[in-house]
Image: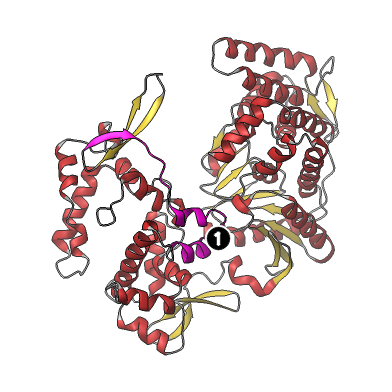
Amino acid sequence: MQKFDLNVDEIDKLTGPVIGRPKSATFRTSDVVGLDTLVKVSNNLYAGLVDDEGREMFKLPEVVTKLEQNKWLGDKTGQGFYKKTKNAKGETEILTLDLKTLEYKPKAKAKFATLETTKTIDNLKDRFKVLLSGKDKAGDFYRDAFYDLFRYVSNRIPEISDELFRIDDAVSGGFGWELGPFETWDAVGVEKSIPLMESTGYKPNQWVYDMLASGNKSFYKVEGGQKKYYDIPSKTYKSIPGRESFIILESKSENVVWKNADSKITDIGDGVIDFSWSSKSYTLGSSVIEGLYKSIDLAETEYKGLVVGHQGADFSLGANLGLVFMYAIEQDYDEIDFMIKAFQNAVMRIRYSSIPVVVAPQGRTLGGGCEMTMHADIAQAAAETYIGLVEVGVGLIPGGGGTKEFTKRVSDAMQEGDVELNALQNAFMTIATAKVATSAEEARDLGILKKLDRVSMNKDRQIADAKQAVLDLVAAGYTKPVQATNIKVQGRTGQALFLAGLQGMQMGRFISEHDAKVAKWIANIMCGGDLTSPQEVSEPYLPDLAREAFLSLTGEKKTLERIQAILTG
């Protein structure tokens, strides 16, 4: 930071999600952990690593000592590199420490030309090539930081490990990096980077030159669908121990049986195919829906079953809000209706296909991604899946079947003598307050995951686990489900209860007028519309009500303002 005259906000912008690292980045992580911990760890490393060429990195700048003396340790003392305060309006505001003056200033938005050029690059490996070739201060920072990192990790073999993949595993697992140091180096290009590293004084270890001289140009390669690492003593590539049974989709490129611009279908063996997609933010646009239809058609005619899942940072952030916003501004409601109907049909095909469909959510699984998960025969969720129906946050309702599915599950679980409205109210509040589960087990508690849904503790095993779930369903004699015709809804009786509660919340200023309007639409769907008494309805009935609500809300100024804020924020 001092070398390139950057500030705290800029460093956290440069060292967060844009390079595949946690959102807390550098200084925010320090505030969470505690500056006192950072100081102790750094001092211990400096004392212990007497022969390490990176030892001087652990000699802390004078400003850190001042912060420690001031007891500005982070969250535990109320201030550190960041400080929460209240502004004149009583609103919470985040202030950032200026390390030159030791004064707190309003958090500034960090902007770099290099980062602007990567906004449309979702693939992290492709992004690294652009980041390290930047011509501005950000590019200078990245080259200095990563060339030093590459040099350093090359010198840790065999000191720390004989095998380079173990260093990647330790760093990725321990610090939450999407790519380990050697994987990052591969993404940048090993051979291409060497002259640039040498010119900046960061010459790597001799074994890297020997690797390139032997004709091996990368630390990892894919052979026979398996990811292999470069073994230094033998100068050959070897399988990573313990991962022979993993299914890494990136390693299955030769098994792709169909693809379009944003999605592909891969044969993952034993009569099972996988449908994956790579759209921006993994949104569910028309090409992804096309691919989902194609994968189910293909599975029904030529395979035993289907896995819906990929190995990106997130599962899906839902619908393409930009497209919804554009159609809404143009008042092209027929196109919006077509979009919703197409997605509803795709979700229902997941549920009512003639083959087992297992959906494998991980990372952020929001909106439509959550609805896909809820309609799977079995969901094979990653343990740390962040999942929920969040549409109310932008003034919309879940339009793909999530509201219907919650209503159906409440109806299916009802026993004679149960207080029906209480259970329905719990489901209503989950949707209306956009509750999001931060783990698979929490999702089970919220009713998003079913009892029979499964959890993968190791994310790298998830696709293989999902494939096994498909084969288990086949072995159990899977039969195509029948659409429900007996979903119990409460009609006007239930709506009256919900509306009374909403009015109270609005009068107490817990929700805005527009929040109440959105919630009323949710109540209308879950209670079956304008029915005079409780009765049973068929499954397609409720999605029709949801589509009507979604279309109505896209015509609301407040909804469009919220969508615009999300898109431009």
Find residue 420 and report its horizontal and vertical position in percent: 71, 20
Quarter of image, res 157: bottom left
Q: Residue at x 45, y 68 (%)?
A: 183
- Left or right of residue 102: residue 567: right
Find out whether residue 125 is within the magenta segment.
Answer: yes
Query: Is label 1 in a helix, a strand or a loop?
Result: loop
- Left or right of residue 118: residue 392: right
Q: What's the colour scheme?
A: secondary structure
Query: Which of the pair 515/489 is nearer the observer?
Result: 515
Find residue 551 and report its horizontal and vertical position in percent: 77, 31
Quarter of image, res 484: top right
- Left or right of residue 36: residue 431: right
Q: Residue at x 83, y 50 (%)?
A: 480
Relative to 167, residue 450 above or below: above
Q: Residue at x 63, y 15 (%)?
A: 502
Q: Is residue 247 visible?
A: no
Quarter of image, res 293: bottom right
Find residue 332 and report its horizontal and vertical position in percent: 79, 37
Which portion, as a residue range, is magenta? 102-131
Relative to 423, residue 222 above or below: below
Query: Which of the pair 475/303 is nearer the observer?
Result: 303
| Mark 1 surroundings within 10 Å by alpha-carbon count, few (fewer than 14), some (14 through 19), many (20 or more) | some
Find residue 486 and report its horizontal and vertical position in percent: 84, 30
Amino acid at circle 1: Asn
- Left or right of residue 209: residue 3: left
Q: Is residue 463 visible?
A: yes
**Residue placed under numbered mark 1 in the picture:** 123
Query: Which of the pair 113/128 is nearer the observer?
Result: 113
Relative to 447, residue 117 above or below: below
Find out whether residue 298 is within the magenta segment.
Answer: no
